[in-house]
Amino acid sequence: MPNLTNGSRIPLATSAAGWAYMAALSDEARAPVLRRLGPSYGDRWEKTQALIMNACEEYSRIGFVLNPGFFRAEINSIGIAVCDKNGRPVYALTCGAAASTLTLDRLRNEIGPRLMLFREKIQAALNVKAVATIL
């Protein structure tokens, strides 16, 4: 798989961006998304869906998701949703790099809090009221 660039398309079900987006959805809004994704994953869906649901739980606890090599085995990544004034996710901010240089500890303790601050600045610039980072 080539390196990602601005505008690259990535899978919703396996990427930190997709997990963050889905985690920020309400349960009611997430259910039809999961139903649409399932058939394209075949026998891998059960594991993939479990990872998505774990990411949703993680997001509700710490405010972002960690993707330790599931999207690409050698890449650790993190994702956080940016929401509109009604609390609906409109896009996701992510950071990822080679697992050998970007550890999960660094993502959790350094990058995650910075992404949360960056999201707050973006929402303030867009004049979006603050939404809870813990849903």
Image (tube, helix red, strand yellow):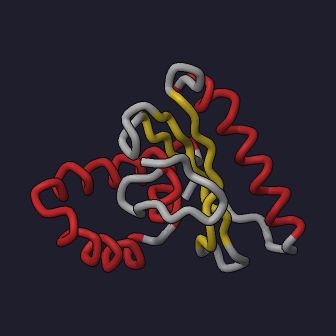
Q: Quadrant of the C terminus?
A: bottom right
32 in relation to 6, above or below: below
For residue 60, say whether it is visible: no
* Residue 58 vertical placement versus 37 (above, below): above
Q: Is residue 2 visible?
A: yes
User: Residue 134: x and y, percent?
Assistant: 58, 53
Residue 7 figure quarter: bottom right
| Front residue of 87 and 20 | 20
Which residue is at 62% across, 43% downward?
95
Relative depth, front residue between 51 and 133: 51
The residue depicted at 62 percent of the width and 68 percent of the height is 91
Give coordinates of residue 123: x percent, y percent: 80, 66
Q: Residue at x 89, y 67 (%)?
A: 125
Residue at the location (50% across, 26% down)?
99
The image quarter in which residue 128 lies:
bottom right
Percent coordinates x, y for residue 14 in the rendering: 37, 53
The number of numbered discs placed on residues in the rendered structure image is 0
Please indicate whether residue 33 sits to the left or right of residue 9 in the image: left
Up/down of 84 relative to 54, above or below: below
Residue at the extreme front of the image, as rendered? 2
**In the image, residue 4 lies at what x, y percent?**
56, 52
| Residue 40: quadrant of the picture | bottom left
Image side of residue 50 versus residue 8, left or right: left
**43 or 33, which is in the foreground?**
43
